[in-house]
Each structure stands twice: as structure tokens, then as C-alpha cells.
């Protein structure tokens, strides 16, 4: 007798009839899409179309003018930040400018350890081992973890930004032009890492102006 089929868990992220404003002007309306676990959705469009605004709204850093974002089957936006905070580890971001997104006063060790401290995971030794393992996973030299972001190249800073995003074990990564500051070789390396993470079940919302990268990484494309 065949085993019973498993229930479809449904989409990880749902964006429902979203409207985005810049000041008093509408920049997007009636945006709807969903992303399943292990799926990558590319977001493309001209400058000023609202791609970054959409990414920040999905993250809950901006609030939509209308519509709703649902994450892991529950309301995400609009929702008070106090109710989102316990679930923030499951949705993480990698932004365009890694140097600007990393705390300049912290070492690589401290940047990677911070999410574990916030979520109360492990003791000092376990956190140190987890940081070293994550640095190795994204090919960030362990010797550079003693340094601060200003001492790293753009490529190293973006690898560390990706490593920090992964430390909390997210289900979804929101990536806002993560390749644009990198030369083609480094961009190719980062893209390969994202493909590997996707194969492991991580969902990706990938904002990019690079049609080649979108075609290689993404299962579907949203044009706005």
C-alpha cells in the first residue's frame, strides 16, 4: 500500500496585492507573488521602479501603503515589530554595499557571533566554533576574522555579510543587488554559493539588474 502523500506546506513567503509609495506618489501597486522553500525569485526592473523598496518592505524595514506580506504562514507586514522580532532570524538580508551594512567597529568574529548572542545560542566556545565553520563555508579566511570591515576587499566583505546572514539559520534570504559591487570573478563565486544554498532548501528573493545572474539563479522572474 503506498505511503500517504505529505501535505503541501504552502509558500514560505506570500506578497498579496502590495502597494508601494515614494512620498505621495505610487511606485507600484497590486504586486502579488509567493516563494516556496528552495525556490529563487528574481526581481528585475528599471532604476526607480521600486525594487529596493520592495525588498525592504518584505524585510519589514518599510511598511507597505497597502496589501500584506505573510511569512511562514503568518502575518508579517503590517505587524508591530515586537511581534516580528522573534521570527527575524528566519528572514535575513544581504545588501548591495557590504561595507555599509557591516558594523565598522566590530571584528569579523564579533560580527558573526552577534546573531548567536542575540538568539541565546551556545556558549562562548560553541559560538566560536560555529563562526569558524561558517567562515569556512563561505570561503572567508579565518585569519581575516580578527580584522574589521574597513580592512577587507569588497568581495571579502560580501562573503562575511552572507556568512552573518546565515548564522541564524534562515529560511529566506532577501538579496538586494548583492553582486553589483563585485568584479565578475567574485560575483561568479558568490552566485555559485547562492546556488548551493538554494539546493539545500534556502529560499531566495534576488533583486538584480544582471539578467545573466537572474537567469542562472532564479526559477521565476518578477518584472516591475
Image (cartoon, rainbow, N blue to C red):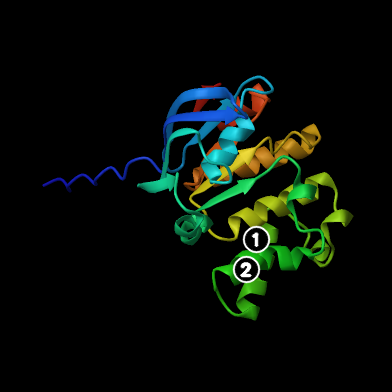
Q: Is residue 217 above or below residue 149?
A: above
| Nearer-the-camera pick, 154 or 2 | 154
Residue at point 56%, 76% (across, down)? 122
| Tag 2 and tag 1, C-beta contact below 8 Å | yes
Q: Residues within 10 Å of mark 1 (few under 14, many from 20)?
A: many
Residue at point 68%, 25% (across, down)? 210
SS under mark 1: helix
Q: CA distance from mark 2 to mark 1?
A: 6 Å
Residue at label 2?
A: 130
Q: Position of residue 54 (x, y in %)?
A: 56, 34
Q: Is residue 169 above or below residue 215?
A: below
Residue 211: quadrant of the picture: top right
Residue at point 87%, 55% (across, down)? 150
Q: Could one spot residue 84 in this view of the protein?
A: yes
Residue at point 57%, 42% (across, down)? 62
Residue at label 1?
A: 134
Q: Quadrant of the C terminus?
A: top right
Amino acid at each position: 500500500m503506498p505511503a500517504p502523500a505529505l501535505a503541501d506546506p504552502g509558500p514560505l513567503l506570500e506578497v498579496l496585492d502590495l502597494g508601494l509609495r515614494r512620498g505621495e506618489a505610487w511606485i507600484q501597486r497590486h504586486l502579488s507573488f509567493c516563494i516556496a522553500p528552495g525556490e529563487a525569485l528574481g526581481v528585475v526592473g528599471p532604476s526607480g521602479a521600486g525594487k529596493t523598496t520592495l525588498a525592504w518592505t518584505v524585510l519589514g524595514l518599510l511598511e507597505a501603503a497597502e496589501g500584506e506580506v505573510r511569512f511562514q504562514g503568518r502575518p508579517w507586514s503590517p505587524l508591530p515589530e515586537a511581534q516580528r522580532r522573534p521570527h527575524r532570524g528566519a528572514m535575513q538580508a544581504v545588501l548591495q554595499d557590504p561595507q555599509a551594512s557591516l558594523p565598522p567597529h566590530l571584528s569579523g568574529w564579533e560580527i558573526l557571533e552577534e546573531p548567536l548572542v542575540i538568539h541565546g545560542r551556545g556558549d562562548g566556545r560553541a559560538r566560536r566554533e560555529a563562526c569558524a565553520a561558517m567562515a569556512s563555508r563561505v570561503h572567508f579566511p579565518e585569519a581575516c576574522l580578527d580584522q574589521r570591515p574597513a580592512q577587507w576587499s569588497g568581495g571579502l566583505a560580501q562573503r562575511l555579510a552572507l556568512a552573518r546572514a546565515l548564522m541564524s539559520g534562515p529560511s529566506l534570504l532577501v538579496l538586494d543587488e548583492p553582486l553589483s559591487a563585485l568584479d565578475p570573478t567574485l560575483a561568479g563565486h558568490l552566485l555559485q554559493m547562492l546556488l548551493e544554498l538554494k539546493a539545500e532548501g534556502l529560499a531566495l528573493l534576488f533583486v538584480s539588474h544582471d539578467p545573466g545572474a537572474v537567469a542562472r539563479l532564479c526559477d521565476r522572474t518578477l518584472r516591475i
